[in-house]
Image (cartoon, rainbow, N blue to C red):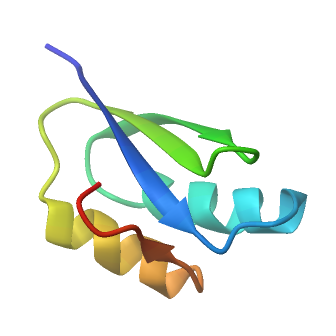
Amino acid sequence: MNTTTTYQVEGMTCDHCVRAVTGELLLLPGVQRVDVDLGSGAVTVTSDNPLDRTDVAEAVDEAGYALAEGS
């Protein structure tokens, strides 16, 4: 069963930002798809199972960005 979760990511301003965040999130085990809405900062992740928020935050941090508080 797939799980889809949307997070708010701060600091993305261009296509390079989108590629960096997408690339890091796709490295997480079980992640199948990442959709980014650059205008709103919404990042929707589809995975095999629910992801640990800490793992997502670390992946986004590795890309050079941060999850918004409460997302």
Q: Quadrant of residue 70?
A: bottom left
Q: Which image quadrant for residue 15?
A: bottom right
Nearer to the camera, 47 or 13: 13
**Which residue does the image show at 54% across and 44% down from the upper left?**
42
Going by the image, does 38 lie left or right of 63? right
Q: Residue furthest top?
A: 1
Residue 1 position (above or below residue 36): above
Which residue is depicted at the point 17% across and 61% down? 53
* Residue 67 at x, y percent in the picture: 40, 69
| Image x and y of residue 16, in percent | 85, 67
> In which quadrant of the rendered image does the C terminus lie?
bottom left
34 vs 41: above or below: above
Q: Is residue 41 above or below residue 70?
A: above
Marks counted in the figure total 0
Q: Residue at x 65, y 44 (%)?
A: 40
Q: Position of residue 56 (x, y in %)?
A: 30, 64
Residue visible at 40% across and 73% down? 59
Left or right: residue 35 versus residue 45 is: right
Q: Nearer the viewer, residue 53 or 47?
A: 53
Considering the image in quadrants, where does the N terminus appear? top left
